[in-house]
Image (spheres, helix red, strand yellow):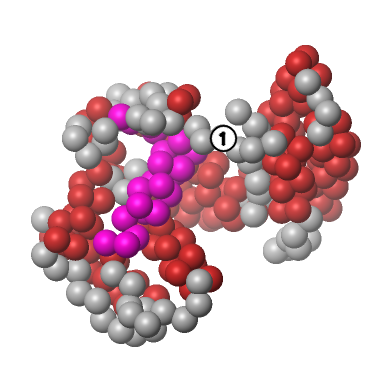
Amino acid sequence: MSETVDYCRQIETYLCQKNGGHLVRIVGPAFEIVRGWAEQGVPLKVALRGIDRTVDRANARGARRRPLRIEFCEADVLDVFDDWRRAIGLNATRVAENAASFEAGEAPEGTPGGRARKGPLAAHIQRCVTRLLAPGVTADAAYDAVIERVTRELDELAGQAASARGDARVRIVQRLAVLDVELLDAARRRVDGATDAALKAEADAELAGFAGRMPADQFARARRLSVDRLIRDAFNLPVLAFD
């Protein structure tokens, strides 16, 4: 119970910051909502990203007259949680009703195949190119060479994807999966021992709510995928694969 209370208080503090210092207490029904997130295993960072999404959308509409309440963030928090679960292979149906039912590869209710539609293939590739062209944190000749090669090929694939149909489209999708592996491998090679240990510790913290709920092999796979996701975040890498 103390961990749940701490979880709620950290979210309350973050929400206060996002509201410009205006305190919105998480009590009563609001506390029950946030406690439900904790019981479902929503990692704190995932919940905070969901709050960010709600706040960003509210700010885009113009000045807010009233502080944002946590109830308005719930849909975004659960959407980000779904995205996070899919990224690491943890999908479930009716999580809130049966927290023990998590199984890798099972599609959430209402999302055929467990994935949302990504839109046109060509647009997906162009978004990936834009992200890869963003300035890197540090220079590394070997890594930069991979980025340049992959970006150049993505440009070619984007041109083909606009009109590709049937087998031609399948070949592009398959090539994207190969390039995605190459890109992630290049990023892994840049991770030193200290960073690797920190990423694994962060992955363990994210998955703490699922420890003991899953078979050991599925949990190990989820941990590997979680570390990979954190590596992508660290290097601002897109997911090239298109499912």
Residue 202, x across and y down, in percent: 42, 52
Outermost residue on the top side: it is 167
Which secondary structure class fits the magenta region best?
Answer: helix
Quadrant in the picture for the N terminus:
bottom left
Instruction: Classify mark 1: residues with Cα within 10 Å, few (<14), some (14-19) or many (20+).
Output: few
Give the labeled residue for mark 1. 117
Quadrant in the picture for the C terminus:
top right
Q: Is residue 25 left or right of residue 69?
A: left
Magenta highlight range:
71-93
Instruction: Kindly tell me whether residue 159 is visible in this rendering.
Output: yes
Q: Is residue 129 left or right of residue 96?
A: right
Instruction: Kindly tell me whether residue 216 is visible in this rendering.
Output: no
Q: At numbered mark 1, what does the secondary structure look like: helix, strand or loop?
A: loop
Residue 160, x across and y down, in percent: 86, 31
Outermost residue on the bottom side: it is 21
Residue 227, x across and y down, in percent: 50, 43
Residue at 11% in and 64% down: 28
Under mark 1, the amino acid is Arg
